[in-house]
Image: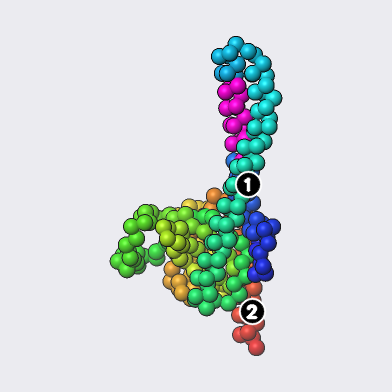
């Protein structure tokens, strides 16, 4: 999670999805092991060329240090890059939400996923396709890799393109918004979450999936909690 306070390195790192952090650790270890194996093969080749077995034994001993060195280098290179990407996505998502004058821009969760727009009928789909501007930097596809940002006041979905981010879907967290599972007639992943928009995206429907099941589960539960809170507040206001 992240807060609106001044971000420290620790808070920025904690904003990265847990599964992606584990991927970085695995990648660093894999590169270290690969470097160690290559070093042993190189030392063995030199030893074979000079007919000295000592080179092989020395290479095996030194490979432990080489593996750790390359693993540390990979970790030190990939970790800051991941943090900067998340900070950039966080900043752009807040900017989009602020541009639509949505309240409460406190970021709860941000992670990578996939977005697919659902149309209630063919006419709406044709109308949407006719009003879209041509973007030669974006491939035409029904499912797009996106950044999904959950704030206390909105859900912002953005895709990456050359030159910056593109807003795909934005939905205020209000009593009108609805989060549900896909219906049988909707051609989307059965494990997806379907979010029916309101406000700026009223009438639009988004299907969301992610390669990070842990972050996806937290997103679902947190958004359900926020929607329940807004609906209870709306009912309480009606009774006054």
Q: Position of residue 111 (x, y in %)?
A: 57, 57
Main SS class of the magenta portion in the image: helix
Tell me which label, 2 or 1, sits earlier in the chain.
1
**Mark 2 → mark 1, Cα distance in angstroms:** 46 Å
Number of disc labels: 2
Q: Where is residue 160 in the image (x, y as percent from the top left)?
A: 45, 58
Q: Where is residue 186 in the image (x, y as percent from the top left)?
A: 43, 58
Residue located 65% across and 82% down the image: 236
In the displayed structure, 84 sits above or below 4; it is: above
The span shown in magenta is: 28-43
Of residue 210 and residue 177, the one placed in the foreground of this image is: 210
Look at mark 2 in the image and give the residue it sits on: 233
Look at mark 1 in the image and give the residue it sits on: 76
In the displayed structure, 66 sits above or below 145; it is: above
Of residue 216 and residue 179, the one placed in the foreground of this image is: 216
Q: Where is residue 77 in the image (x, y as percent from the top left)?
A: 59, 47
């Amino acid at each position: 999670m992240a807060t609106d306070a001044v971000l420290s390195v620790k808070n920025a790192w904690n904003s990265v999805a847990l599964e992606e952090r584990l991927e970085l650790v695995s990648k660093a270890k894999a590169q270290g092991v690969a470097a160690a194996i290559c070093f042993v093969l190189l030392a063995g080749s030199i030893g074979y060329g000079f007919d000295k077995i000592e080179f092989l034994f020395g290479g095996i001993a030194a490979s432990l240090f080489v593996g750790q060195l390359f693993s540390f280098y990979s970790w030190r290179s990939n970790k800051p890059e991941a943090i900067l990407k998340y900070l950039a996505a966080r900043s752009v998502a807040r900017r989009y939400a602020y541009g639509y004058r949505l309240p409460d821009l406190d970021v709860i969760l941000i992670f990578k996923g996939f977005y697919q727009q659902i149309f209630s009928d063919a006419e709406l789909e044709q109308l949407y396709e006719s009003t879209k501007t041509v973007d030669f930097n974006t491939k035409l596809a029904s499912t797009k890799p996106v950044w999904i940002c959950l704030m206390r006041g909105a859900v912002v979905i953005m895709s990456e393109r050359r030159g910056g981010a593109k807003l795909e879907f934005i939905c205020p967290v209000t009593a009108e918004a609805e989060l549900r599972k896909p219906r049988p007639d909707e051609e989307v992943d059965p494990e997806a979450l379907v979010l029916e928009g309101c406000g700026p995206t009223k009438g639009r429907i988004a299907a969301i999936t992610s390669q990070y099941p842990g972050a996806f589960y937290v997103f679902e539960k947190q958004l359900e909690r926020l929607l329940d809170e807004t609906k209870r507040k709306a009912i309480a206001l009606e009774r006054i």
